[in-house]
Image (spheres, rainbow, N blue to C red):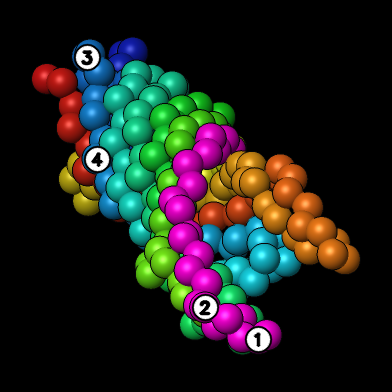
């Protein structure tokens, strides 16, 4: 007769698979810190094409740091992309750099097959800078050259999205996600003989890949 007590196994012992980030976080006391590098693409708002922005998908990069507990985390993120804005036949196109500095929050919705499903929200500051930031062109009717200053733009930005994250070897993890962000800009369009200045809302889409290192409190 064989007696099997609670906690004993009647069959061959199975070695556990690699722990997910969620299991590691829940198993250790205190808080954890995650630091990661980001890469991906940004699809700029199609509405920006009306102002001669190149809105084709652009390569983007950044970094993120988060502190959290079992299901919720928060931190900061830097994300940068670039494109060009044309000036028609008046002058060469200027390079445009768009950098967002945001507070980020994540909530773990669930987990399956060692992969976490995450919902995220972000809000922060968008900085748009130009290079060169001064354009000179000659009026078609003659006269002295006209100099146009391309001043930097700073606006609020907010967004949200979904992502997946899976643990790699040791305390490393890899994640993928998509996020939509909304921001407003002052715009100027020609309407016959007048120039109409108004405020418009635009939305970008970003797809990101993150390679992150997890630091746990022992």
Q: Give the camera-side residue of 98 and 176.
A: 98
Comes first in the chain, label 1 or label 3: 3
> In the picture, which quadrant includes the N terminus?
top left
Residue at 49% across / 47% down in the picture?
Answer: 153
On residue 29, which mark appears? 3
- Spatial separation of the CA atoms under disc 1 and disc 3: 71 Å
Depth check: give the residue in front, 90 or 154.
Answer: 90
Which one is in front in this view, the residue at disc 3 or the one at disc 4?
Answer: 4
Q: Is residue 208 visible?
A: no
Q: CA distance from mark 2 to mark 4?
A: 54 Å
Judge by depth and name the residue closer to the eye, 102 or 189. Answer: 189
Q: Residues within 10 Å of mark 4 (few under 14, many from 20)?
A: some
Could you tell me how far apart the alpha carbons at marks 3 and 4 are, in whole angstroms? Answer: 19 Å
Which residue is label 1 attached to?
140
> Element at badge 4?
strand
Percent of width and height locating residue 175:
41, 50
Q: Position of residue 3 (x, y in %)?
A: 31, 17
| Discs 4/1, front | 1
Q: Name the residue beneath numbered marker 4.
A: 35
Does 171 sit above or below residue 218? below
Which residue is identified by label 2? 144
Cα distance between the residues tagged 3 and 2: 71 Å
| Residue under the image location 29 percent in, 52 percent down | 37
Please state which of the two labelled residues, at mark 3 or mark 2, is closer to the viewer.
2
Q: Earlier in the sequence, mark 2 or mark 4?
A: 4
Quarter of the image for residue 34 reads: top left
Query: Dot 2: what SS?
Result: loop
Residue 195 is drawn in which quadrant? Answer: bottom right
Q: Kindly state the secondary structure of the residue where label 1 is placed.
A: loop
Whether residue 94 is situated above or below residue 107 in the rendered picture = below
């Amino acid at each position: 007769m064989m007696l099997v007590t609670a906690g004993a196994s009647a069959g061959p012992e199975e070695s556990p698979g690699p722990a997910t980030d969620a299991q590691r976080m829940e198993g250790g006391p205190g808080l954890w810190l995650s630091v990661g590098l980001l890469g991906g693409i940004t699809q700029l708002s199609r509405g920006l094409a009306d102002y001669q922005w190149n809105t084709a998908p652009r390569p983007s990069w950044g970094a993120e740091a988060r502190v959290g507990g079992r299901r919720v985390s928060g931190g900061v993120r830097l994300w940068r992309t670039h494109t060009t804005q044309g000036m028609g036949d008046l002058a060469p196109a200027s390079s445009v750099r768009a950098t967002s500095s945001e507070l980020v929050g994540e909530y773990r919705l669930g987990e399956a097959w060692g992969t976490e499903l995450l919902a995220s929200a972000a809000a922060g500051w968008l900085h748009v800078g130009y290079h060169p930031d001064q354009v000179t062109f000659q009026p078609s009717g003659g006269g002295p050259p006209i100099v146009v200053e391309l001043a930097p733009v700073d606006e609020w930005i907010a967004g949200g999205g979904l992502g997946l994250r899976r643990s790699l070897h040791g305390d490393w993890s890899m994640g993928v996600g998509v996020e939509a962000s909304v921001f407003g800009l002052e715009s100027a369009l020609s309407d016959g003989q007048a120039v109409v200045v108004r405020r418009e809302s635009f939305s970008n889409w970003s797809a990101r890949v993150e390679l992150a290192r997890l630091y746990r409190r022992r």
